[in-house]
Image: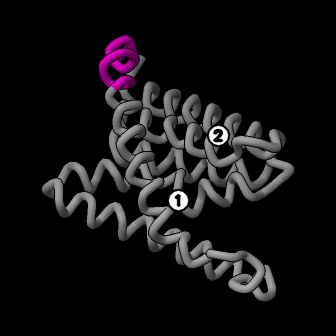
Amino acid sequence: MGSKTRKITLSALFAALSVVMLYIASVWPSGQIGLVAVSSIFVAAAVVEGGIALGIYVFVVSAALGMLITPYKIPPLLYIVFFGYYPVIKSIIERFLNVVLQWVAKLVVLNAALTVIWFFLREVLVNFEESIPGVWLIYPVGSVVFIIYDYGFSKVIWFYISRVSKYMNKG
């Protein structure tokens, strides 16, 4: 299989798997955020197998298809706002920055995504701040949860690289 054919095949496979996870997240009432996070693993796999461009392609295709075919739109929106593109951003950040700047950049990306979600919820829900007690905790608690998520996500990527990627036909 040629390199171009391999990349197209892998991107279609990873996008399809990501969309399947988004669909399951949209019909399964519990664990939606976890399933959306799992769907981002396929973007990370695309980055490992084909580079940043392939990861971006898988993200765009799976986000568009997720919005089109899922009955409940919150999981694909979470994927679009943060989880889907994060593996690409993570790869770029970890490739070019030292460890301290990596964490600063990652937390900036997270807090930007939280701010987008915050403003979206304020527009959709009237009296958003008053209706949810402790809503201001979203940034500090979200940052702590994110650090744990990023550490675990790194472990999943290393597992993929060491146990799965070596069996992929590199053509």
Residue flagged by tag 2: what amino acid is it?
Leu
Q: Tell me where residue 65 appears, x and y as whole percent.
A: 70, 48
Q: Magenta: predominant secondary structure element?
A: helix
Say which residue label 1 marks.
Answer: 82
Would residue 159 be visible to someone looking at this image? yes
Q: CA distance from mark 2 to mark 1?
A: 13 Å
Q: Tell me where residue 89 appears, x and y as whole percent.
A: 36, 56
Would residue 171 be visible to someone looking at this image? no
Query: Along the polypeptide, which appears first: circle 2 or circle 1?
Result: 2
* Residue 124 lies in the magenta stretch: no
Please name the residue shown 62% across and 75% down the image: 134
Horizontal relation, residue 94 to residue 136: left or right: left
Q: In the picture shown, does residue 29 fall above or below 20? A: below
Please name the residue shown 64% across and 34% down the image: 16
Please name the residue shown 44% across and 65% down the image: 110
Horizontal relation, residue 118 to residue 166: left or right: right
